[in-house]
Image: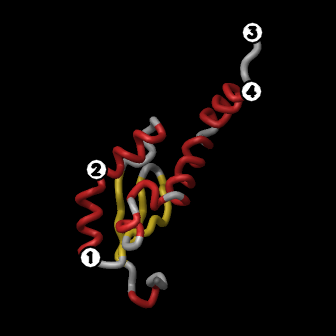
Amino acid sequence: MLERLSQILDRFLEERDIKKKIYEKEIILNWKNYVGNLISTHIFPKNIRNGVLYVYSDHPTWSENFINLFPEIKKKINDSFGLEIIKDLKVYLMRKENGRKK
């Protein structure tokens, strides 16, 4: 029986844990789609490593708000991929001299 190329490719990516890395990059690149416009202007994703989402916040109040919303956002992201990609969160406060220009 012949396998479809897409099935072979999926198995190859999963066996080498590449699929999860692709999904992690997808989350970073399309951050606004996962968290919304308002949050994306104050919370900036840095990377995802070992299931931990690392983000920068431009203000302590936004850090706290995001921490409170994190379980809901984590579920939304993980459900969209059908995998547990995000397990935990680490929030860093940006220093003014390192802040993003708006």
Amino acid type at circle 3 is Met
Q: CA distance from mark 4 to mark 3?
A: 13 Å
Give the residue displayed 30% in from the left and 78% down from the top: 59
Q: Secondary structure at mark 1?
A: helix
Residue count near mark 2 (Cα–Cα under 10 Å), binned few <14, some 14–19, many ≥20: some
What's the mark number on residue 60?
Answer: 1
Q: CA distance from mark 2 to mark 4?
A: 36 Å
Residue count near mark 3 (Cα–Cα under 10 Å), binned few <14, some 14–19, many ≥20: few
Question: Are the residues flagged by discs 1 and 4 in contact, CB closer than 8 Å?
Answer: no
Residue linked to disc 4 = 5
Q: Position of residue 97 (x, y in %)?
A: 44, 90
Amino acid type at circle 2 is Pro
Amino acid type at circle 1 is Pro
Q: Secondary structure at mark 3?
A: loop
Q: Position of residue 92 (x, y in %)?
A: 36, 72
What's the mark number on residue 1?
Answer: 3
Amino acid type at circle 4 is Leu
What's the mark number on residue 71?
Answer: 2
Give the residue displayed 45% in from the left and 37% down from the top: 83
Query: Relative to 89, is 82 on the left or the right?
Result: right
Query: Relative to 61, is 12 on the left or the right?
Result: right
